[in-house]
Image: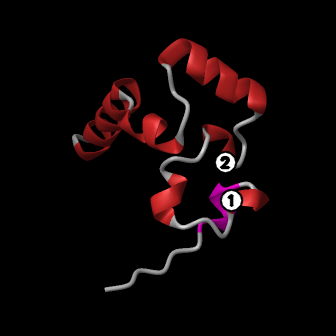
Amino acid sequence: MAISVNLDAALVKAYESTPLAELVNAPVTALAGVSDADGEALQKAFNIKTVGDLAGNKYIKAAQAIAELSRISK
């Protein structure tokens, strides 16, 4: 089953037509709002180089879980 999603608002122009399977390996700077300096800081602090690295980061996952659990526990 094919899934269609428009991620243009989440990506910089150069990556708007990149397939999802390739976006996982794209640099974090492919994400709209993530500058080169931000990308360097993420790499230095957490060894995050790609969109996939960011998505799989244990601190990102922990923060998402805390936020979601907080939302549903109200």
65 shown above or below 24: above
Q: Residue at x 33, y 26 (%)?
A: 58
Q: Is residue 71 magenta?
A: no
Q: What's under tag 1, amino acid-wise? A: Tyr
For marks 2 and 1, give the CA distance: 6 Å
Q: Is residue 23 left or right of residue 17?
A: left
Could you tell me residue 52's position as x and y percent? 45, 43
Q: Is residue 63 left or right of residue 34?
A: left
Q: Is residue 28 left or right of residue 53?
A: right
20 shown above or below 58: below
Badge 1 element:
helix
- Pointer 2 local density, CA inside 10 Å: few below 14, some 14–19, many at least 20: many
Badge 2 element:
helix
> For the N terminus, which image quadrant?
bottom left
Q: Residue at x 68, y 65 (%)?
A: 16
- The segment highlighted magenta reads 7-11
Q: What's under tag 2, amino acid-wise? A: Ala
Q: Is residue 10 left or right of residue 57?
A: right
Residue bearing mark 1: 15
Residue bearing mark 2: 30
- Pointer 1 local density, CA inside 10 Å: few below 14, some 14–19, many at least 20: some
Q: Quadrant of residue 71?
A: top left
Q: Earlier in the sequence, mark 2 or mark 1?
A: 1
Q: Residue at x 22, y 40 (%)?
A: 73
Towards the viewer: 7 or 19:
19
Q: Which residue, as the protein is rendered here, is positioned at the far left?
A: 73
Could you tell me residue 12's position as x and y percent? 74, 54
The answer to whether mark 2 and mark 1 are in CB contact below 8 A is yes
55 shown above or below 62: below
